[in-house]
Amino acid sequence: MLAFVHPIARTNRARSTEEYRLKAWLAHHLHSLKLAAEQFRAAPVATLFTILVIGVAVSLPAGLYVLLSNLERAAGSVKPQAEVTAFFKDVDETKARALAASLRKRADVAEVEFVSKADGIKRLEAAGLADVALGLPENPLPHTLAITPGEATPVALEALAAHVKDNPDIERVLVDTDWIKRLAALMQLGRDLVSMLIVVLGVALAAITANTIRLQIYAQKDEIEVARLIGATDRFIRRPFLYFGGIQGLVGGLAGWALVLAGGLMLETSVAQVAAAYGSQFRLVGLSLRETGLLLLFSALLGWLGAYFAVSRALRQND
Amino acid sequence: MTAAALIEISEVTKRYPGGHEALHNISLAIEQGEMVFLTGHSGAGKSTLLKLIAAIEPPTSGHIIVNGQNVGRMKRPALPFFRRNIGLIFQDHKLLYDRSVFDNVLMPLHIQGVIGNDAGKRVRAALDKVGLLNKERARPITLSGGEQQRLCIARAIVSRPALVLADEPTANLDDAYARDIMDMFRAFNEVGVTLIISTHDQDLIHRYGGRKVTLAYGKQVEG
């Protein structure tokens, strides 16, 4: 094998130490970055439009996601109203209070309000039904528990209701999960919609990038051909394009983020007015730092993938 | 075989889609350090043979072994590393016109990870050898035909390949230029580089001597 290496080249190869190779590797990456930057500069308007398109594609699922999480938050402030109401059989008050106390200790219970027979009548009277109360021969009201679950999901509510119902002293349990079920179903629909949009527009983002890169490859096909003839690896040829795709995706993601932010700012005042009309302190919340990071990572990754796909395809076609 | 030939071509046929047979049953062995002229009329299969040796195209049948590697069966990832040992000189130069003379010659070094002063020195040494040192900042498009050919040679030798394949390097050049280039090749050969030069210029072969392989209509008629 050595015979194939020219004598002068052999002495030179001895010099390629690890450090030198690392330097060469870094130099190549920097060079690839520079080439990618040159591509941006060569077609600023086209690049700007592509970035805008990517931004819109990113802002749709991101915006819907923000809307959904705000809705969830708004719904969350109503959630404590979800209750399980339990009516006792004719048991004495101490026994009923004991059950209330034991329920309070449970992890899935946030609060237990005990309403005794006597309190019940008083409430009836306070509600303006004193005549009715007076007309009764004896107090017909049972002791009552109003239990607020720790978690206001339909599943948690129903589990809690089932547990309370198992108690022999309990006559009847009322639980209204319908509205919570509806809300949860709507939220799930929204989340599914976000996932669907992420997939569809993610593919669109990769495709947009692949198309841009395809045009660039076409413009540079001489250079690619020569590079391959003189021993460039696929990786070497691919790298500047990958940088371009990744950076374009990242900047497009930033544009999408800015669009979501702008949309939020535009809606902020009207949302505050609606909230005030309902006597609520509700305010819009945008993407968190972590969510923003994920969004940027995701769009950069998709741009990179689109570029990878386009270059690999072009390289295979040229074989 | 104690001293296997650098290039072993055995019973190689190349047929293109459509049925045109560019090469028919060629067998040839080229030793390390040889300078071989590949000759024949245009369309005889000279360029095709060079392309097969450089693994640019695969043979339809037969084997081409270069330095112990079966070129036709080479895996895709191995190809770039194989090509780095070969200096290719093209009839149409294949220069890149969007960059300077210097950057054209730098390209093979860049691909092989040679950087900095090291690379600069080697590029200038190669340009010096072909007499283009004073043109390093020029664009290739401003060079004459002969200069472009020499630039192509500089790019082929800058990575110090053990084997140089030149496809009609003196075509379209006047006699003085052609002689310059042939002198250059002879100098490379003297330091141990194996050369295969395709040409239809019989005078040139007579003048420089060396082994001659003649093709006619894809068949080997001499050598």
Image (cartoon, grey):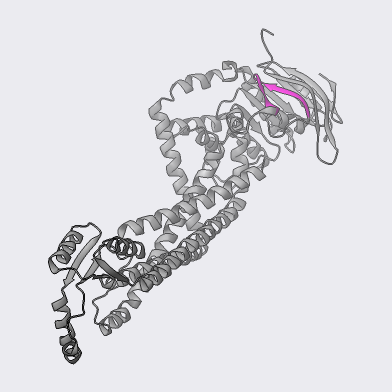
**Residue found at x 56% / y 39%:** A234
Q: Quadrant of the N terminus of chain B?
A: top right
Is the stretch drawn in magenta largely helix, strand or loop? strand
Q: Is residue A316 left or right of residue A109?
A: right
Q: Please provide percent x and percent y for residue A103.
A: 20, 61
Specify the quadrant of the image occupied by residue A122: bottom left
Classify B210 as above or below A46. Answer: above
Please tell me which residue lies in front, A263 or B22. A263
Specify the quadrant of the image occupied by residue B84: top right
**Magenta segment includes B98:** no
Please tell me which residue lies in front, A301 or A137. A137
Specify the quadrant of the image occupied by residue B38: top right
User: Magenta residues?
Assistant: B61-72
Q: Is residue A146 left or right of residue A62?
A: left
Q: Is residue A59 visible?
A: no
**Residue found at x 43% / y 54%:** A298
Please tell me which residue lies in front, A111 or A306. A111
Q: Quadrant of the C terminus of chain B?
A: top right
Q: Please provide percent x and percent y for residue A198.
A: 47, 60
